Amino acid sequence: MTIRRFSALPILLLAHVTEHAVSEGLYAGESHLPASPLWQPLQQALEVGRENSQVTLVYVYARGCGPCRLMEAQVMPQVRPLLEQLALARLDIADHSTRMVVNDAVVTPSAAARNLGIDSTPGFVLLDPVGQPIIRETGLLGARLFGMFLAYATTGAYRFGSFAEYCASKSPPPAGTAHGESRSSERSTVP
């Protein structure tokens, strides 16, 4: 008899979950992924970072870049809480015609990316609240490494040591490797 009394419970839970999903728009053709981050023009992101004492993430991409699309669709949604703690700017490295003002200079997004030391995509530069480079990385990064990269900035750890030291302090390297997933991050740390 106990079984009969609770046999409707899974159906009720499914109905509640389905009702919630429909009310949230999950069955109305909307994406299951969180909304994309709020990217701002570089100068505006730098101003927000300065005003709020936040680090700015500059994401350098290209429209036809497959690894960029993977970062946007698969990796960035996994680290969204960290992205929300940063001022965010995005530059199209292939845009040689749009003119924008950055720190009183008129540049193209492509030139701005190169001025930040990024010449391939996807590329990422973290800038401190006064706009000075902290660290840069290029290439497709896994969610774990990208999360560590962002946490290095959001926690303020960049003030106390290198990215490689930060990664080493957070987890031991996998068996058989010297530096785990940290790639060659030591060389990309900006002095």
Image (spheres, rainbow, N blue to C red):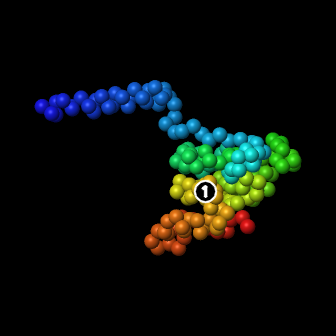
Q: Position of residue 157 (x, y in %)?
A: 62, 61
Residue 110 versus residue 163 in the image, above or below = above
Of all residues shown, which one is farthest toward the front?
A: 52
Q: Give the residue drawn at x 74%, y 46%.
A: 51
Placement of 153 over or under 109, stated as above or below? below
Q: Position of residue 123 (x, y in %)?
A: 67, 54
The residue to which callout 1 is attached is: 155
Q: In this rendering, is residue 19 above or below 40?
A: above
The one of 101 and 110 positioned closer to us in this rendering: 101
Q: Considering the image in quadrants, where does the C terminus appear?
A: bottom right
**Residue 92, visible in the rendered structure:** no
Quadrant for the N terminus, please.
Answer: top left
Which x, y percent locates residue 181?
A: 54, 64
For the question of whether residue 9 can be seen, the reply is: yes
Q: Residue drawn at (56%, 55%), measured in percent from left and top?
A: 147
Give left or right: position of 8 versus 117: left
Residue at image point 73% right, 58% down: 133
Q: Pointer 1: residues within 10 angstroms few (<14), some, or many (20+)?
A: few
Closer to the camera, 48 or 164?
Answer: 48
Secondary structure under tag 1 reads loop
Residue 170 at what x, y percent from top left? 52, 64
Hey, what amino acid is under mark 1?
Thr
Q: Is residue 31 above or below residue 53?
A: above
At horizontal 84% and vertical 44% (from top left) the residue drawn is 101
